[in-house]
Image (spheres, grey):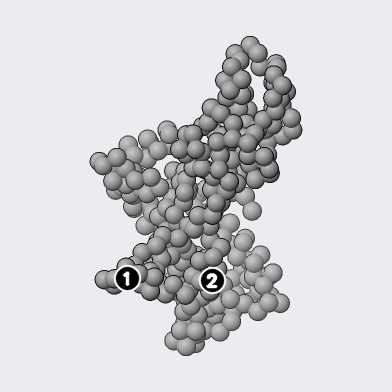
Amino acid sequence: MDQLVALCKRRGFLFQSSEIYGGLNGFWDYGPLGVELKRNVREAWWRDMVTTHNEMVVPAGAPSTYEMAGLDCTIIMHPQVWKCSGHYDLFHDFMVDCREAKSRYRHDQVFGRWVEARGQRFFVATEQQGDGAQEEMQHRALKFLGLRAKDAEELKWDGPMICLTEVDDAAKVLGPDAKALGTLTEPREFNLMFETYTGAIRDEKSKTFLRPETAQGIFVNFKNVLDSTRVKIPFGIAQIGKSFRNEITPRNFTFRSREFEQMEIEFFCRPDTSADWYKYWRDRRFKWYLDLGLAGERLRL
């Protein structure tokens, strides 16, 4: 991943936001080549979904003809939108803090294994997954016990890798960056929406949120689209726009960032045809990515 980030920076695709001041974690600026690549993908998607759509012709694989409209909704919406959608109460991650390392982790993204040695049984936690995870856990278990690499045979691993959410006894957990057991706190909820305020007075009445997704703008404008365009079911509404999520631990380059752009449609159809429409859109979007040149083995349904 570090090599990919370095390549993108060197070639002018992406830069760390505010880099001259140390950077801001989870935010990325698109460079001269990156902004053109992004614009090309965005325009190709809009042409395919909206501009070139012919509502008089049944597309290959579609159950029938359909109509398509576009929207561009505001980033800040009435707080009641997010309360009614469930985001205000449910859009959160459970986090655990390490009292020793002063680090914070998503509860469902920490894994590990139970191990026994020298009369102790404890859970070695790690954020790593894949080939390097076992080696990293073994190194940390040996270090915790004061053993050397040649003593690795003394470690008796119990069971496969499991998520930290399945571990009940936090006192026996060796945190991902800890040197002692029992340093992780109980999981706590953190809302993922960015808060902001409208107007001159900062109080509960003026508190709003940066949208965590673009879909809600489509839903609240459903009747406006019906009244102004006279579309009939089945039809879709497309939108491209920025969304914001206060990821506690942004990672994997742009794949989990705090500010990102979404391209989506919400498609409205009758319940008895929903399965057929789902199959149509699933296959059509899959083919579109293949036509862009993405290798088939990189895409999974």
Q: Earlier in the sequence, mark 2 or mark 1?
A: 2
Q: Quadrant of residue 151?
A: top right
Q: Residue at x 58, y 46 (%)?
A: 186
**Residue 112, percent from left and from top:** 64, 35
Mark 2 element type: helix
Q: CA distance from mark 2 to mark 1?
A: 21 Å
Mark 1 lies on a secondary structure that is loop
Q: Residues within 10 Å of mark 2 (few under 14, many from 20)?
A: few
Q: Is residue 154 above or below residue 113?
A: above
The amino acid type, in three-letter code, at marker 1 is Thr
- Residue visible at 58% across and 62% down? 284
Query: Which sits in the foreground, 291 or 216?
Result: 216
Residue 20 percent location from the top left of the image: 25, 41
Residue type, numbered disc 2: Ser
Depth check, front residue: 144 or 274: 144
Instruction: Relative to 233, say whether 6 is above or below.
Output: above
Q: Is residue 38 above or below residue 47?
A: above
Residue 11, disc:
none
Q: Which residue: 69% across, 19% down?
A: 118
Q: Is residue 57 left or right of residue 23?
A: right
Q: Which residue does the image show at 43% across and 34% down from the upper left?
A: 2
Q: Quadrant of residue 276?
A: bottom right
Residue 123, image x, y percentages = 65, 32
- Residue 67 in view in this figure: yes
Image quarter for residue 148?
top right
Where does residue 227 sit, x and y in percent of width and height? 47, 88
* Residues at marks 2 and 1 touching, judged by CB atoms closer than 8 Å: no
Between 299 and 204, the one lying in front of the other is 204
In the displayed structure image, the side of residue 36 where residue 224 appears, left or right? right
Q: Residues within 10 Å of mark 1 (few under 14, many from 20)?
A: few
**Residue beneath label 2, please?**
85
Residue placed under numbered mark 1 in the picture: 198
